[in-house]
Image: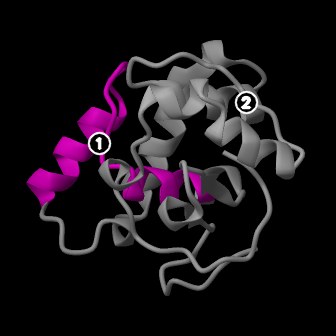
Amino acid sequence: AGHGGAAAARAATLDDARVEPRVITEGVIPGRLDGLCKDVLEVGGGGDCFHRCSAEKFLGGNGRHMEARGRVASRVASCPWLMPGADEAEQTRLLRRLRTEGVCTDGGVELQAAALEFNVIIQIWTAGPAGDYTFFPRNAEGEPLL
């Protein structure tokens, strides 16, 4: 997760942005990050990596990842427009998954809600720029807030 950039956001799921572990160990992503003066923040996996990163950057420590998860889930619950077309059962299922430790969720909704909750631009970098995603805090009309 990071600040910056002005690329247009697009809907995405984590399946679209998956990166094989070998990409990190072989230096593809660190090489891209070096060019941006960024470092890899190792937070572990197990379905909590995004929330551990959020907790580290915005809440003062990755041990607070459940607080980060809760804040993102609360934001989703208070902004049903983040889940257009989702019926009540789908919304309930996503919120349950968002609040469950170790569960990786859809991604697009979760990342958009986190951008809004923490008032940041979130960039997901993959092995190549074609697979990158950017999430801006947006209002219900889809207008960027930053």
Quarter of the image that includes the C terminus:
bottom right
In the displayed image of the protein, which residue is found farthest to the right? 37
Q: Which residues are magenta?
A: 88-115
Left or right, 20 with respect to 142, comes to: left
In the displayed image of the protein, which residue is found farthest to the top? 63
- Taking the spot 13% from the left edge, 58% from the top edge, the residue there is 88
Q: Amino acid at mark 2?
A: Val
Q: Closer to the N terminus: mark 1 or mark 2?
A: 2
Q: Nearer the viewer, residue 20 or 111?
A: 20
Residue 125 badge: none
Quarter of the image that includes the N terminus:
top right
- Closer to us: mark 1 or mark 2? 2
- The residue that mark 2 highlights is 40
Q: Is residue 42 above or below residue 128?
A: above
Q: How much space separates mark 1 and mark 2, taking CA atoms?
A: 29 Å
**Percent of width and height locating residue 16:** 34, 55
- The residue that mark 1 highlights is 95
- Taking the spot 49% from the left edge, 87% from the top edge, the residue there is 141
Using the rendered view, name the quadrant where residue 44 is placed: top right
